[in-house]
Amino acid sequence: MDTTRSLFLPPQGSTVASDVDALFGFIIWVSLFFFLVVTVATVYFSIKYKRKSGKGETTLYLESMALEITWTVIPTILLMIIFVWGFQDFIRLHIVPANSMEIKVTGQKWFWSFNYAEGATGVGELTVPVNQPVKLLMSSKDVIHSFFVPAFRIKMDVLPNRYTITWFEANMTGEFEIYCTEFCGKGHSEMWGTVKVLPKDEFTKWLEAGSGPGEGESMKEYGARMFVKNACNTCHSIDGSQNVGPTFQGLFGRREVMSDGTSITVDENYIRESILSPMAKQVTGYDPVMPTYQGILKDVDIDGLIAYIKSLEN
Ligand code: CUA
C-alpha cells in the first residue's frame, strides 16, 4: 500500500491509481522537457540570428536528411511508448476481474443511488469492502451523468436506456469523493457523494445491518437522517423557503392545489405516493422533476420520513 500523497493529485485509493499516475507523470515530464527545449531554442536563436543591418546573412538550408529523420523517429518512439503503455492500462481498466462484487449504480437528477445484490441500498454513499474488486453496473433514470472517483482514477459516463460498466479495487480504507462530471442541469454541482471503504468484517456487518432506525433512535430522528441521506434536502426546505419542490415545513395536513386543479390534504398516503410515484399528483406551480424512490427507499425509510415531516410544524 502506497500512502504517499502527491502535491497535485488525490490519494492513490485503488489498485490502478499508481499505474495511471505513472503514465500521466511520464506524459507530463516528456511534454515539459520538449516544451523547454523548444522555448529555450526559440529564444536563443531569435537573439543570436537577429537580422543586423543586412550584413552577416546565414547560410540557406533547404533540407537536412539527418534533421528530418531525428524529428520523425524520436516522437514516433515516444508516442509508441505512450500508446502501448496507455493501451495496457486501458485494457486493465475495462476488464472486470471475475471475482468482482457487483453493485448497481443509478444516476438521476441529482443524486447517486446504489443497490446491492443482498438487498441493501445506499443514496449518495457507496459502501464497499477494501481489497475486493467491485464491479459497478450503471444506468441513468433521466439524462447523461458521469461517475467519477478521483482517488480511484475511474470515470465513466452513466446513460439512460443502457448500461455502462466500470470497476475498481480499493486498496485503503477511508472516505473518498464521488463527483458527477457531466453537466446535467441546475443541481449538477451538488451531485456528489462518498465512497466509504470499510475493512472486510465491518463491511459484512454493514451489509447485514440493512436499514431501519439505530438503537435508541426515534422514527422522527431516523426520518431526519433519511431526509439528508437520500438528498431530499436538495429540493425541499424545512424552513418554509422556496426551492425546487414544496417546503416540508407545515406540509403535513396542508391543503394543496394539484396541477390538474383538484386539491388534496397532505396525509400519510399522499406522502407515500409522492415518494414512490411523484408524477401521480403534483402540487401546482412546480416543475415535474421529482425522481421516484421506488426500489431505493424501503417501507421503514418512508415511515421515518413521514414521522419527520409530521414533526415539521409551522
Ligand atoms: Cu449528474 Cu452532473
Image (spheres, rainbow, N blue to C red):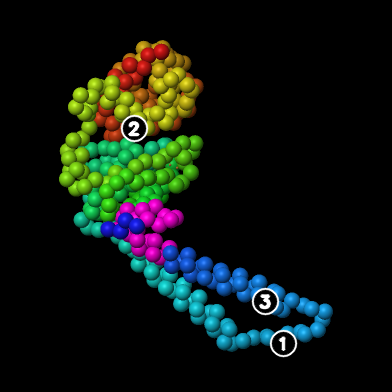
Asked if the beta carbon under badge 2 is closer than 8 A to the nearest atom of ligand 1, the reply is: no
| Label 1 packing within 10 angstroms: few (<14), some (14-19), many (20+) | few
| Label 3 packing within 10 angstroms: few (<14), some (14-19), many (20+) | few
**Nearest to viewer (mark 3 / mark 1):** 3
**Nearest to viewer (mark 1 / mark 2):** 1
Q: Which tag, 1 or 2, sits closer to the chain's start? A: 1
Span shown in magenta? 5-24
Where is residue 142 drawn, in percent x and y? 41, 39
Q: Which mark is residue 45?
A: 3
Q: Which mark is residue 59?
A: 1
Asked if one can make out residue 16 in the rendered structure from this viewpoint, the answer is yes
Q: Quadrant of the C terminus?
A: top left
Residue at mark 3 to residue at mark 2: CA–CA distance? 63 Å
Where is residue 98 drawn, in percent x and y? 22, 58
Q: Which tag, 3 or 2, sits closer to the chain's start? A: 3
Asked if one can make out residue 266 in the rendered structure from this viewpoint, the answer is no
